[in-house]
Image (spheres, rainbow, N blue to C red):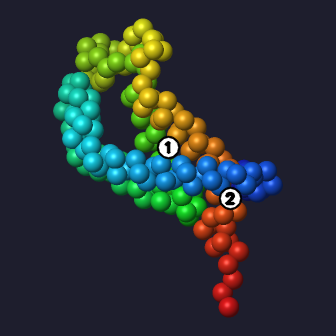
Amino acid sequence: MEITQRIENWASTHYPAWFDFVRMGLGVFLFVKGFIVLSQIDSVQMFISNINALNGTNVNWNAQLLVQFIAYMHIIGGLFIALGFLTRIAIFFQLPILLGAVLFTMPGMRMDAGNTMAQGGINFVWTEVNLNTTTFEWWTALFTLILLISSFIIGSGPWSVDKYLEHYEET
C-alpha cells in the first residue's frame, strides 16, 4: 500500500498537463481499435486458429470468444481510459492484450509446430531479423504498450472523471 501511495504522490506532483491529451487519444485509439477488431473478426479468428493448429495438444482456444473478449475489452477499456474513469484498472486489463500483440507480431519471430523442447507447445523460433519487414502493426502495438505503461504509472490526471469524483462533495 505504501508504494502505491508513493507512486500516486509522485504522479500528482510531476504530472504534465499535456499528458491528459495523450491519455485521451490513447483511449480513443483503443476504443476505435475494438471496433476494427470486430469488423475484421474473421481474419483475427484465422490468426488465433493458426496458433491453435500449431498447438499439438487438445487445448482448444475458442477463437470466437477470445476475439470478442479482446474487442470488447478494447472498447470498454478505451472508453474508460479516454474519460479517465478507473484508469489504472482499465489499463491493467489492456496490458496483457497489448503484450500478446507485441509478442505475436514481433519481427523475425515465427511459430513452429515441431517443438522438441516441450511436447504440445508452440515453439517460437527466431528467424533472421530483417528490419525492412518490420510490420506497422508491431510498431503500433509496441508504442501503444509503452503509452499504456506510462499512463499506468502516471495516472489519470487533472482532466478526468477520477479526479472529479475525488473532489466531488455531495450537497
Left or right: 74 in relation to 146: left
Q: Residues within 10 Å of mark 1 (few under 14, many from 20)?
A: some
Left or right: 144 in relation to 51: right
Residue at (25, 14) in percent of width and height: 114
Per the image, the residue denoted by label 2 is 157
Residue 1 appears in the picture as rendered = no
- Where does the N terminus fall, quadrant-wise? bottom right
Q: Nearer the viewer, mark 2 or mark 1?
A: 2
Question: Is 163 located above or below residue 31 in the figure?
Answer: below
Q: Position of residue 36 (x, y in %)?
A: 34, 47
Q: Position of residue 47 (x, y in %)?
A: 26, 32
Residue 163 appears in the picture as rendered = yes
Left or right: 139 in relation to 112: right
Q: Position of residue 116 (x, y in %)?
A: 29, 12
> Considering the numbered disc 1 on the image, is that residue within a helix, a strand or a loop?
helix
Q: Which is nearer the eye, 102 or 5?
A: 102
Residue at (48, 15) in percent of width and height: 131
Per the image, the residue denoted by label 1 is 95
Question: Is 26 located above or below residue 105 in the figure?
Answer: below
- Determine the CA span between mark 2 and mark 1: 19 Å
Question: Is 42 located above or below residue 22 in the figure?
Answer: above
| Mark sitting earlier along the chain (2/1) | 1
Q: Residues within 10 Å of mark 2 (few under 14, many from 20)?
A: many
Residue at (45, 11) in percent of width and height: 130
- Where does the C terminus fall, quadrant-wise? bottom right
Q: Residue furthest right?
A: 13
